[in-house]
Image (spheres, rainbow, N blue to C red):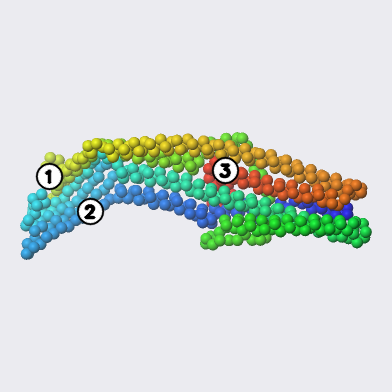
Amino acid sequence: MILVASQIMQALKAQPDTSTADTTAIFSFETFYDLILRQHPVVRQAQLLSQQAAQELRLAKGAFDPKIDASWQTKKYQNTVYYDLLDASLKVPLWFPIDPKIGIERHEGEYLNPEHYISDKTDYKQLYMGVSIPVGQGLFIDQRRATLKQARLLQDMAEADQVKMINKILLSATKDYWEWYYAYNNYALLQQSIEIAQDIFDRTRLGFEYGEVAAIDTVQALILLQKRITDFQQATIERSRAALTLSNHLWNEQGMPLALQDAARPDTLLIDLVSQEALGHLLEQARANHPELLKLELKNQSLAIDQRLAKENLKPSLQLDYALLNQPLAANGEQNDIQLTDNYKIEMNFSIPLFLRKERAKVAQTELKIQDNALERVFTERSIINDINAQYVTLNTTEAIIEQQQEMVNNYQLVVEAERFNLENGESDLFKINAQLDKLIEEQSKLFKLKATYQKDLASLYWAAGIPYLGLHTFSAE
């Protein structure tokens, strides 16, 4: 019987934390993390956000693309050309509210409207070159410039959304990995406990056959073995379930799902401590770069552009178009001196609503949206800071509990050692040792659970702070 207790102690001292396992079967968290960043569909989907924002910016820039316009009208009736009108032009929108325009007109026919008349000296053709200037509304900002500015903000907003989206999947994956870590180590621990219970049962039965123990002792040993087998079966189910959940995050380069191999095992866990100084750094980073706060700040800038445009629309619309006709170059190639007071065309368009109710309402609406966004930002920042502090307290508390739990496991090992010594001196029995072993196994299982919880809390802390890649980007092979 003394040999049994010695074997039990040796087995339990070799805790199944995979540190002595075959390294070829180890599926480390670093490898898992790198696979997600490289091949997970949601990560790839998040990377599309930047491309979509780039296309939005490209779309907005399209408002400044040079544009060729051409129109042609003709009417011929009873062999008489009433009119033949051709107008082709090139317009080049600029950032400043001056749009240059150059074009050529060709008008001929028996019944032309006088305003379309062009002399036959230039073969009924006329070159024009001019500009269009908004003197009132649109001078400092207009819809196309506002759209372009907001599209540039959208790129930064897409980057914030991308960080948030990737962090979300990494948080879920991290929690699943450490849940698998606990399930696997608990499974290994209970597997060892079956071996111990089987050995106890075999030796008790042998002792009964030699008349050293009572028959009821063999029944108790059998009950112990059955209990350990039942617990192991439940642990097997939990391990399989955790492995399947972890497999949800595994994909190959072709986008096909992968399954976690049954021989795979987690790596040895190392506790990363977070100091008070590190907490201060996290709080500072959260205030400056948290995705939610960045989005609210960018939204505020976008609303400011809307507000500026709305105020611009309070001004009267006054559009001036000025064009030189056949100067400095005529349609027939003749060069002329530029005369601003002759051979020109001017057009002026003026409009203003009498009550400006629509424009004033738009200004008021944007002002209210800015106030609403500012209040939301204050509340969001406060919630984020409180969440970080709460996660830090939880992390520190879990760390302290782990230390206490480790001491408890060590003390239970001492108790089992003491019971073993008493057994050698005839002052204890195998079932008393078994009761202490039950407690030792239970506390070891709790220790694994706490270590896994600590890692999940650590990931939640970085999630709360909005740190890109949950602060684990050093593992990435980018």
What mark, if any, has residue 462 been given in the picture? Answer: 3
Q: How busy is the neighbourhood of tag 1: few (under 14 within 10 Å), some, or many (20 plus)? A: few
Relative to the observer, which residue lies in front, 365 or 146?
Answer: 365
Q: Tag 2 or tag 1, which sits nearer the N-term?
A: 2
3 vs 2, front mark: 3
Residue 307 sits in quarter: top left
Against 164, is 111 above or below?
below
Tell me the quadrant of the picture where the N terminus can be found. Answer: bottom right
Disc 1 and disc 2 in contact, CB within 8 angstroms:
no
Answer left or right for 33 relative to 214: left
**Numbered disc in front, either 3 or 1:** 3
Real-space CA distance between mark 3 and mark 1, rounded to the nearest whole angstrom: 71 Å
Q: Residue at x 47, y 45 (%)?
A: 160
Residue at point 51%, 56% (across, down):
41
Using the rendered image of the protein, determine whether residue 199 is visible from the camera's viewpoint. Answer: no
186 or 56, which is in the foreground?
186
Query: Disc 1 marks which residue?
Result: 343
User: Residue 472: where, in percent of width, then height?
Assistant: 58, 47
Labels 3 & 1 near each other (Cβ < 8 A): no
* Residue kind at label 3, given as amino acid type: Tyr
Percent x, y for residue 19? Answer: 71, 52
Which badge, 3 or 1, comes first in the chain's sequence? 1
Residue, disc 2: 69
At mark 2, the secondary structure is: strand
Q: CA distance from mark 3 to mark 2?
A: 56 Å
Image spot of residue 214 (x, y percent): 90, 57
Most foreground residue, 478 or 377: 377
In the orientation shown, which residue stands out farthest toward the bottom? 78
Q: Name the quadrant containing residue 359.
A: top left
SS at mark 3 in the image: helix
Tell me what residue is drawn at x 24 percent, y 49 percent. Answer: 91
The residue at the far front in this view is 216
